[in-house]
């Protein structure tokens, strides 16, 4: 192998440890399985947890898609993809969701539904939803085991009293299979419902915090909410009450990035670039 | 117009790599590429820091890491640490006794006269920190002449091969707790097991041994200044080469396979009574790391004492809290996460704006 | 030539098969070519010196232990327990703790066939869209009885992988098993 580097970079012991952890993560949906988390040649916080999962999963017959903020071409996605291509000779990469067997993503779940033969790996900066109410991991582990989330609910309730809204914007606490509450990684609230009853296995990897957790296919995933204050996804309606559309593909259902164009106008575009391009191709035949 | 900052990522990365390479080589023809051995020898303390924080004793690759990272300590340690991930573990050493260190320096602050004697060795401790302008233009000839004249003054046998430990004499006097052989656990391996708290002392020591020097110093300093009460005395600080023994792959017999430069510090702190009316004794803190890193070893020893206190009686200060100390001293973890904030966060920021706008609208509606 | 199952490339493919099995409990997943020894292939894929394995029925020989680079552990403490599913249970596995349920053991059981048995079970839970039927051949009745005890206090419990010569089927602790007549 080039540079004398093992296929998929990690030595086989490291891969086996990750594989054992992944299996426990699936068996205990939403539980954060600790693992040793080797140092990767990119920064902690740049997706090393997701990367270690991908490297422990990937084989020469896989087709990989890497996205960041929904885009295949953002610097970090390119960087991760190049590293995986370099260390995994024989694999294919793609930007088309439909062609991928393995998808590594930061901050988004792809716009279109995943299939049963695909695996989604999400990069996680903060794995524990309880960290906002309890700094000690020792205590959090007991709270999780007992499914004691009263303090988290109180926090949400205080929000409602103060702002008349739940102010958690992303990393929305979500209860898996009726027991563990997870931090679903910094995906927008728009993506949270996709965790529920997913066709594909969804794996979460936190490199710096050394945790792996999973939402198995066809699993219950419920964002925390109250009967009278429901969970709400991001609102993209304009001042006339119309759903904003992507300026490139005109989709009125996708999650949108907002920015200011060179004329100083506020404009919106799909965050998922692959979806947006496919919509444009459909429109132009 | 396409994706503003996000498109063209591949080209941007290649360009950035080129710019960095240009920065490294910008002296052009007038420059000499840094020689690996020069880095190891002349940037001795920098090199020591990298083998220690990188957690891999590979002097040559540590020097390469310094060269390729343009001297950034965090980046260089990081590259060395990442290299470690690609190598399987073939053998494990038994616990080593540092009495056998071949010393280049050894001091005690607790006793004027210690068995074997004090040995100041190479240190900047008593140097005047005045810039030596003559080094601005040092010729290779001058450089060699200095070395030659100094070598000439050295006795043939510079020092004894092994020195007794200062602590042993304190222990013999009953001023320190006896070594409890029964509690000698199998050391916790932080490279194979994540820290799940509470962790044993060996996990704390291993984490600090490859911790970032500045981070350890900052937290130890907080204890020294009053956010804690260790009040240490350096019983012994030693720097030298420790022979590394490995079981022979066929016979299993311990065989010397090389030596590692390391720094070890043992601090003694004020005595602790306990509830059982046992005889009070001094307490101990231990620090050790690869390379010659005295400030790090001292900081680690102080933190070891503080953490032992915290593990026993509960943490009253940050430096006594194992989770606080051990999860925040790793340079590779902390620098990576600090850097990651430079990556795009468009999606989460969009969600943040959505929440802020919604709550603003609600408040405005309430005020009307 | 090292047997196929000890090679990294095989283990990657075998792991994906095991992963699929655990992701979709009750489905039969055929391993890549493994010389009629799916159970050993699974052990080769998941176990090494950094894990622990019990073999209470002494099904493994010395060469296997050397290959796995591991020494046998008592079933009470092992992360993996290897048994013939046709024989009754005779140990108490580690169920993990509330704070660390991942220490609950993985049982690898060998069976003649994963379908066509006399007793059928209905499986529900994560990984299963509605329900799936499962009728193993020759599984000793003590296993599911014990499993119900071991897994009575989620998240504590054991996870099972049943293996024939060629295929595997998983029953994670999250799967509910109901006997149907």
Image (tube, rainbow, N blue to C red):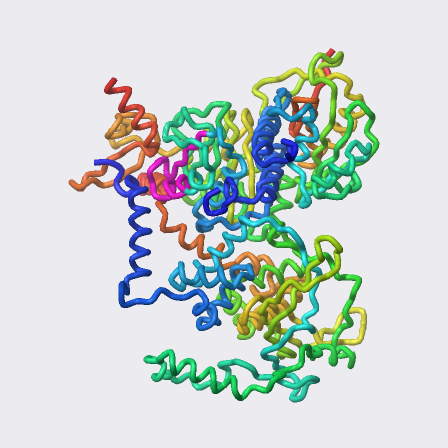
Extent of the magenta region:
A63-82
Left or right: B321 with respect to B354?
A: right
In percent of width and height, residue B208 lies at 58, 63
Q: Residue at x 30, y 23 (%)?
A: A279
Position above or below: B113 against A12: below
In percent of width and height, residue B333 lies at 49, 54
Q: Is residue A66 magenta?
A: yes
Residue A32 in view in this figure = no
In percent of width and height, residue B100 lies at 69, 72
- In this rendering, the count of numbered labels is 0
Q: Residue at x 59, y 69 (%)?
A: B262
Quarter placement of the C terminus of chain B? top left
Position above or below: C145 against B87: above
Left or right: C35 with respect to B76?
A: right
- Frontmost residue, B142 versus B73: B142
Position above or below: B241 against C84: below
- Frontmost residue, B326 versus B128: B128
- Frontmost residue, B108 versus B148: B148
Residue A111 in view in this figure = yes
Q: Residue at x 59, y 42 (%)?
A: A12
Left or right: B280 with respect to A151?
A: right
In percent of width and height, residue B205 lies at 62, 62
């Amino acid at each position: 192998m080039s540079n004398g580097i093992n296929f998929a970079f990690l030595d086989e012991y490291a891969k086996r440890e990750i594989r054992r952890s992944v299996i426990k993560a699936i068996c205990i949906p939403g539980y954060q399985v600790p693992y040793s988390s080797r140092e990767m040649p990119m920064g902690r916080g740049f997706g090393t947890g997701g990367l270690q999962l991908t490297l422990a999963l990937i084989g020469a017959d896989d087709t990989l898609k890497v996205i960041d903020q929904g885009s295949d071409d953002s610097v970090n996605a390119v960087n991760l993809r190049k590293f995986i291509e370099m260390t995994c000779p024989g694999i294919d990469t793609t930007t088309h969701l439909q062609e991928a067997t393995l998808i590594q993503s930061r901050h988004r779940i792809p716009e279109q539904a995943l299939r049963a033969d695909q695996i989604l790996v999400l990069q996680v900066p903060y794995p524990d939803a309880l960290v906002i109410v309890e700094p000690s991991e020792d205590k959090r582990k007991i709270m999780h085991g007992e499914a004691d989330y009263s303090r988290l609910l109180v926090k949400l309730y205080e929000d409602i009293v103060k702002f008349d809204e739940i102010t958690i914007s992303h990393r929305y606490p979500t209860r898996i299979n009726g027991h563990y509450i997870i931090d679903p990684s910094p995906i927008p609230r728009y993506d949270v419902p996709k965790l529920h009853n997913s066709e594909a296995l969804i794996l979460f990897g936190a490199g710096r915090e050394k945790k792996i957790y999973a939402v198995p296919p066809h699993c219950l995933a419920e964002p925390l909410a109250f009967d009278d204050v429901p969970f709400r996804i991001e609102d993209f309606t304009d001042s006339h009450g119309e759903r904003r559309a992507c300026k490139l593909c005109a989709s009125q259902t996708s999650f949108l990035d907002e920015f200011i164009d060179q004329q100083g106008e506020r404009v919106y575009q799909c965050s998922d670039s692959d979806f947006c391009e496919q919509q444009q191709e459909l429109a132009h035949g | 117009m396409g994706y503003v900052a996000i498109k063209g990522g591949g080209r941007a990365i290649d360009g950035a790599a080129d710019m960095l390479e240009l920065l490294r080589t910008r002296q052009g023809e007038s420059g000499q590429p840094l020689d690996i051995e020069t880095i190891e020898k002349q940037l001795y303390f920098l090199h020591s820091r990298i083998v220690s924080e990188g957690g891999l004793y590979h002097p040559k690759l540590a020097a390469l890491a310094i060269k390729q990272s343009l001297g950034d300590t965090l980046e260089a340690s990081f590259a060395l640490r990442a290299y470690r991930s690609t190598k399987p573990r073939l053998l494990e050493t038994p616990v080593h006794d540092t009495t056998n260190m071949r010393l280049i320096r050894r001091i005690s602050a607790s006793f004027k006269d210690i068995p074997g004697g004090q040995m100041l060795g190479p240190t900047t401790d008593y140097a005047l920190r005045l810039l030596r302008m003559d080094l601005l233009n040092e010729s290779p000839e001058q450089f060699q002449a200095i070395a030659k004249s100094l070598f000439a003054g050295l006795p043939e046998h510079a020092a004894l091969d092994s020195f007794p430990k200062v602590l042993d004499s304190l222990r013999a006097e009953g001023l320190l707790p006896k070594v409890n052989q029964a509690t000698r656990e199998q050391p916790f391996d932080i490279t194979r097991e994540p820290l799940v708290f509470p962790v044993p002392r060996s996990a704390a020591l291993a984490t600090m041994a490859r911790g970032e020097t500045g981070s350890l110093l900052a937290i130890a300093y907080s204890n020294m200044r009053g956010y804690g009460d260790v009040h240490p005395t350096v019983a012994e600080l030693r720097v030298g080469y420790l022979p590394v023994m490995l079981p022979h792959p066929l016979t299993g017999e311990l065989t010397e396979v090389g030596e590692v430069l390391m720094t070890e510090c043992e601090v003694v702190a004020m005595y602790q009574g306990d509830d059982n009316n046992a005889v009070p004794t001094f307490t101990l803190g231990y620090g050790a790391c690869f390379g010659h890193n005295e400030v790090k070893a001292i900081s680690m020893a102080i933190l070891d004492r503080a953490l032992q206190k915290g593990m026993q009686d509960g943490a009253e200060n940050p430096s006594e809290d194992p989770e606080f100390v051990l999860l925040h001293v790793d340079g590779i973890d902390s620098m990576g996460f600090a850097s990651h904030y430079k990556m795009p966060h468009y999606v989460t920021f969009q969600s943040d704006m959505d929440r802020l706008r919604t709550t603003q609208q609600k408040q405005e509606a309430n005020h009307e | 030539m090292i047997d196929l199952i000890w090679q990294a490339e095989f283990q990657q493919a075998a792991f994906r098969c095991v992963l699929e099995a655990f992701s979709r409990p009750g489905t039969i997943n055929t391993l890549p070519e493994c010389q009629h020894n799916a159970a050993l292939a699974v052990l080769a894929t998941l176990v090494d010196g950094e894990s622990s394995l019990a073999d209470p029925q002494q099904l493994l020989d010395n060469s296997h232990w050397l290959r796995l680079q591991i020494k046998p552990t008592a079933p009470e403490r092992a992360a993996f327990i290897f048994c013939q599913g046709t024989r009754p249970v005779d140990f108490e596995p580690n169920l993990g703790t509330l704070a660390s349920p991942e220490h609950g053991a993985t049982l690898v059981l060998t069976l003649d066939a994963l379908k066509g048995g006399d007793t059928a079970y209905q499986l529900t839970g994560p990984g299963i869209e509605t329900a799936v039927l499962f009728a193993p051949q020759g599984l000793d009745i003590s296993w599911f009885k014990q499993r119900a005890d071991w897994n009575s206090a989620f998240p504590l419990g054991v996870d099972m992988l049943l293996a024939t010569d060629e295929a595997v089927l998983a029953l994670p602790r999250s799967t509910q098993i109901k006997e149907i007549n």
